[in-house]
Amino acid sequence: MKRIQQRIFELLEVAHPDDTSSRVTDLFLFVLIALNVLAVILETVEDLSTQCAPIFLFFEVFSVAVFSVEYVLRLWTCTQDERYAHPILGRLKFAGSWPAIVDLLAILPFYLPMFLAIDLRMIRALRFFRLLRFLKLSRYSESMRIFGKVLRSERAELLVALFVAGVLLIIGSSFLYIVEHDAQPEVFSSIPSAMWWGVATLTTVGYGDAYPITPLGRFLGAIVAIMGVGMFALPAGILASGFAREMDKRREEPEACPHCGKPLESAEAD
Amino acid sequence: MKRIQQRIFELLEVAHPDDTSSRVTDLFLFVLIALNVLAVILETVEDLSTQCAPIFLFFEVFSVAVFSVEYVLRLWTCTQDERYAHPILGRLKFAGSWPAIVDLLAILPFYLPMFLAIDLRMIRALRFFRLLRFLKLSRYSESMRIFGKVLRSERAELLVALFVAGVLLIIGSSFLYIVEHDAQPEVFSSIPSAMWWGVATLTTVGYGDAYPITPLGRFLGAIVAIMGVGMFALPAGILASGFAREMDKRREEPEACPHCGKPLESAEAD
Amino acid sequence: MKRIQQRIFELLEVAHPDDTSSRVTDLFLFVLIALNVLAVILETVEDLSTQCAPIFLFFEVFSVAVFSVEYVLRLWTCTQDERYAHPILGRLKFAGSWPAIVDLLAILPFYLPMFLAIDLRMIRALRFFRLLRFLKLSRYSESMRIFGKVLRSERAELLVALFVAGVLLIIGSSFLYIVEHDAQPEVFSSIPSAMWWGVATLTTVGYGDAYPITPLGRFLGAIVAIMGVGMFALPAGILASGFAREMDKRREEPEACPHCGKPLESAEAD
Amino acid sequence: MKRIQQRIFELLEVAHPDDTSSRVTDLFLFVLIALNVLAVILETVEDLSTQCAPIFLFFEVFSVAVFSVEYVLRLWTCTQDERYAHPILGRLKFAGSWPAIVDLLAILPFYLPMFLAIDLRMIRALRFFRLLRFLKLSRYSESMRIFGKVLRSERAELLVALFVAGVLLIIGSSFLYIVEHDAQPEVFSSIPSAMWWGVATLTTVGYGDAYPITPLGRFLGAIVAIMGVGMFALPAGILASGFAREMDKRREEPEACPHCGKPLESAEAD
């Protein structure tokens, strides 16, 4: 029993490179999650959801079954992890950990209508909770881990850039509101409305549903656009350089443990 | 008396990290300023401003009261600063300094209608002067300080980039005016009008209210767009690299004085 | 015979810098390919294709004749290359190599209607297969080679950035679909439809055919835009830095063999 | 006579920093050129050009007078430059040099109608030739010189990036033409028309006058947009890094000759 529990624990965890069946389990779960996200996306296409209703239903039941078994097995085997070693308290602690909550949220929307009286609109909303299964990917995705690391290491720069961008957005939008409100009372009805123009302009998206039409408004808008473009491009530049640094670090330390992502030979914290 | 004055001076200035009550004062003023900006923004939403008129009024009176007391206290205690030590001349000098003028402008719009006969349109305009309270943030915002430093250190590059971008904007817009004027006399009515197209194109905002429709105009417009995009992205690149350099410098000198932001161990000017 | 075969092989291959007639052959083929692409582009302009039909036809026949002769000569002389030395197996192996397949695809659309009964619609589609002649350029284009190298060396970074961007695209579009579906059932009819908005927004193209109109949708859309712009600009930053590194490497090793592009003095693999 | 000639030569050339009257001359000409460009821009605004016609006319006559005198004086004094030392051949050589041709083109549009019978439409076109006076700025503008240097040093990278971007533009536009032509025969009437969509998309301008509407067209368009954005942002990244390098070089060699811009102590060519 103990050995079965340990083996299942190994299978479910991110695999050692030489543990083939564990890698197959990982791949299977990874693909199943990806297909689930795809299913939620495709189900919103009306033609597809009516024509292929049985397929979607079968796939949903199958997925929930797999994820439920996965959740139960994880709860059972988590005591193999020394952090959750205690048979009861350890399992409770594990159930309260972030990955376990995500796993639970991924299956809960399926079971909830069985136990609770939920009206139809609620059920429709619950369907999108299935998108939370996306979060299950974070366990397998190296990309997300790298990205999270970059975000954390560049936190200070990003906050400064966001603060400055926010100040510029508010000031620019307020100016445009003052100048354009009388000419376009619909589009620039309030400063929050003007901020919709501001975001569209400063990110350079420019949908074309809101733009100044008075000469003064255009002059100010042009200045805001020219000044703002640089400021809103800052986070991209910061992320790109943080990224380059992170990847360089990885290239220099290729002997990382494939299990935990930490370098094998050095004990320094990252 | 002297000691009370000194204590109040300390409370109002940016706090030493171990002076808890001073930090609370800073935080209180910071939040109050942010809420004031938010109030100005929300007050422009008509539904809100009619429904919650009493709240907005109370908050405005409360804020002006606090800022007025703050201003008077700053004027009283500024003699603690050796630059403004003289009881009368020092206070006048302080009243003429940039932060004190900002503080005054932040409350003046409230008192002005009491002393001067101002028509209603003027009062409406005065309301937006309250956005100047935003500037009070600069005292507390490290972000703004860092950003200002980057702007100053990259001044030369930014000016070159802006000059080249300006030349491109004028030349491109003139060409488009010449080519498109006859086909679209409304949109490309003059070179300044064509420059509205130019700014929207070169910043890649592209609202869609102005674009060439003749084949030659499109050809020239495409060339301007392709060439110009690189030029208008230059300031962003320059800012990003200046930013990275500034943050690297800060990381290397973590022992900065939290009071004034200058490094403690080195006496070199920044 | 043997010597003629070798000379033709040399003429067709990318030239040694001091082999003038081989360089002329390269230039001739390069220009002919470029003109072919131009012809396909211009032929779609109706006025031109009817007025200059004979010119287009003559040019097409001439080009196919040249490319056919080139293909046959390459097949005949490929045995000069030691990889394809065997008279029959070598030629078969060469015919199955990527450049030879491209060469064949470039002329096949012309001959196909002669041998097969193809309806008119098919013939029209075949015309665009001529754009495949573009791929013949890759033999002569140093630019494409450099670019391919950069893509390969930055593969890891690009994949991470694309994955994160994809996740953001799906999550952002799903949110907007949920929020905007009832207000704009046409534009946000399904998550795939919402992803069209997502791509237009996150790449900052912003055509203006799809944008949120509800306050909540605009708020979420603004957040997605601000967050996403940085993420979608990442690949550009990654490519730019990879590019700079590659060009620096080239500048340091100017003694590269002009025939194969590999450095002459060092034997290290790239 | 000789000394007057030399003094005028010094006055017209870019000034030594300690030659005050020469610097004043430079500044006067610089401002006059800038005002001329401004005049051409403002003259296209119909209200202004009718109301202030006399002012514009006076300013034009004044400017042409100054520029004419400047041109004649330059022609007279150019023999002071050792390259144009010969009294006749030297002056002819100078008249054929780029700056002298620009100077001539800047005044010619004014004199031409006096000597040649030119119809009215031609005269209107000639007016815009005055924008060529912009080019006279290049003599005084350090920014343009720096920018030109960056362009030259990054030539190789920029060409590669432009070539790859061009290939992507042609391939993407052809695909969209094939897919969207039947659904939107007006907008995607030919590949050149589709390239207008391509440029607007790949530069992320996105006017919104051309975009795919079929599902397949949107799918392909999205892929082109995602791929292309990175490629079209490359030149910006290349320029930015070239710029940073150039400015770093300048900072390290602050002792540059203000007359010619070359470093004083080192004799190395740039």
Image (cartoon, coloured by chain):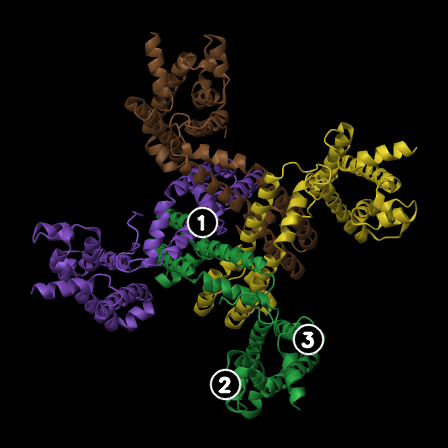
Chain colours: A yellow, B green, C brown, D purple
Quadrant (top left/top right/bottom left/bottom right) for the N terminus of chain A: top right
Q: Residue at x 69, y 48 (%)?
A: A269
What secondary structure is marked by label 2? Answer: helix
Residue D241 image label: 1
What amino acid does circle 2 point to? Lys
Q: Position of residue B67 (x, y in %)?
A: 63, 82
The Cα–Cα distance between marks 3 and 1, rounded to whole angstroms, is: 43 Å
The Cα–Cα distance between marks 3 and 2, rounded to whole angstroms, is: 27 Å
In this view, the mark in front (3 or 2): 2
Q: Is residue B136 left or right of residue C81?
A: right
Chain of the residue that carries numbered disc 3 in the rendered image: B
Chain of the residue that carries numbered disc 2 in the rendered image: B
What secondary structure is marked by label 3? Answer: helix
Q: Which residue is mark 3?
A: B28
Callout 1: 10 Å neighbours few (<14), some, many (20+)?
many
What amino acid does circle 3 point to? Phe
Q: Is residue C196 left or right of residue D51?
A: right
